[in-house]
Amino acid sequence: MHERQPFEALVRSWLPEDLRPLDLLTVQVNLGYRCNQLCAHCHLEAGPGRSETMNAATLEAVISLVFESGCARLDITGGAPEMHPALVTLIERTRERVQDIQVRTNLTVFAEPGMHHWPDFYRSHGVQLVASLPCYLEPEVRQQRGPEVFETSIAVLRRLNELGYGRDPHLSLNLVYNPLGAFLPPQQDRLEQEYRQRLRASYGITFTRLLTITNAPLGRFRGDLRRQHEERAYLELLRASFNPETIQGLMCRHQINIGWDGRLYDCDFNQAVQRPLDPGAPQTVWDFQTSTVLSRKIVTGDHCFACTAGYGSSCGGALV
């Protein structure tokens, strides 16, 4: 029965060996947990009061790692990455060495004092954007992300459209949907069509793709589940919805995650629970070796069931 097997054991029943990487297409960098929002689903519990932030020495090591890895994509996240003063340096120094740089933005940060320049900077450097918008309706967004977030996000999306984002094929604007409760995302393509119709009709907004991401039972979302006595039921839902077709595309098989302090993880969710790479693999950016990282055993836990449930989930959206 799926609901009784640990994640590693269940995946092992579908693979000829332990869960291991297939390649290293993406280096994901978390610059820190400071954010201008306090989102209810945040697995890292980011917010205005967080002080964790990447220092200059770690940033230099990260840039060296990106060069050495030969990755095709640099995926920059936080917190709100724009609140880190070295974001400009990271983008400018890696721009010519990777095929694709993308930043995960909450949109509202562009409306903060001193942050209005970011859309133009991103456009001039060809940065791709992955933007949080958990629904096309204001009440739902307010519930998850707070008051005035929806209105500000719509205004920012219109500005991004004016700059070419979501319209120019070289300036992708991907929106992110997270469920508002203890349930799985619907089919990604179908929900994308709903987003397109509603955002275009109501606000004249266009975008590139919609990414549906399942909420991991971590951070603030786990706290809400526990307060509502829904944590066990949600974990059972994730286990019962295990889909073996998602295993090939799991993000941990195609990327490495770097914490603000330089420690290495299989994914941002493992960073949230402080589960570093397998002991046989490099542990920090300073001892990174591509060959050793590619041969590592991937570290898993019960939260990993969120990535294999239903249509699957990753930083790039649904897997099947």
Image (cartoon, grey):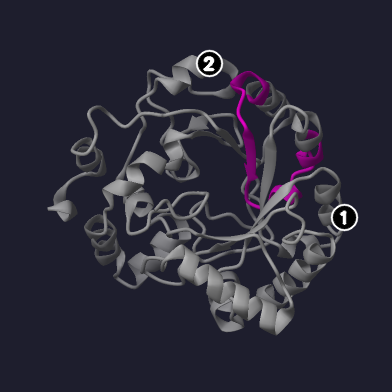
The Cα atoms of the two marked residues, 2 and 1, are separated by 36 Å
Q: Amino acid at mark 2?
A: Gln
Residue in front for this viewpoint, 131 or 301: 131
Look at the picture and state if 259 lies above or below 69. Answer: below
**Is residue 225 left or right of 55 when viewed as pictured?**
left
User: Residue at left 41%, top 71%?
Assistant: 181
Q: Which mark is residue 191?
A: none
Residue 280 counted in the magenta span: no
**Image quadrant assignment for residue 113:** bottom right
Residue 168's x, y, as percent?
77, 56
Magenta residues span 66-89
Mark 1 belongs to which amino acid?
His
Q: Residue at x 30, y 64 (%)?
A: 234
Report crowding for label 1: few under 14, some 14 to 19, many 20 or more residues within 10 A (C-alpha).
Answer: few
> Callout 2 environment at 10 Å: few (<14), some (14 to 19), or many (20+)?
some
Image location of residue 198, percent across then percent down: 61, 80
Residue 52 visible at all: no
In front of the other: 150 or 100: 100
- In the picture, the disc for residue 289 is 2
Q: Which residue is mark 1?
A: 117
* Side (left or right) of 287 relative to 246: right
Which residue is depicted at the point 59% across and 22% down? 69
Was residue 75 drawn as part of the magenta stretch in this picture?
A: yes
- Element under label 1? loop
Q: Position of residue 211 (x, y in %)?
A: 53, 59
Q: Does the image show residue 81?
A: yes
Percent of width and height locating residue 304: 35, 47
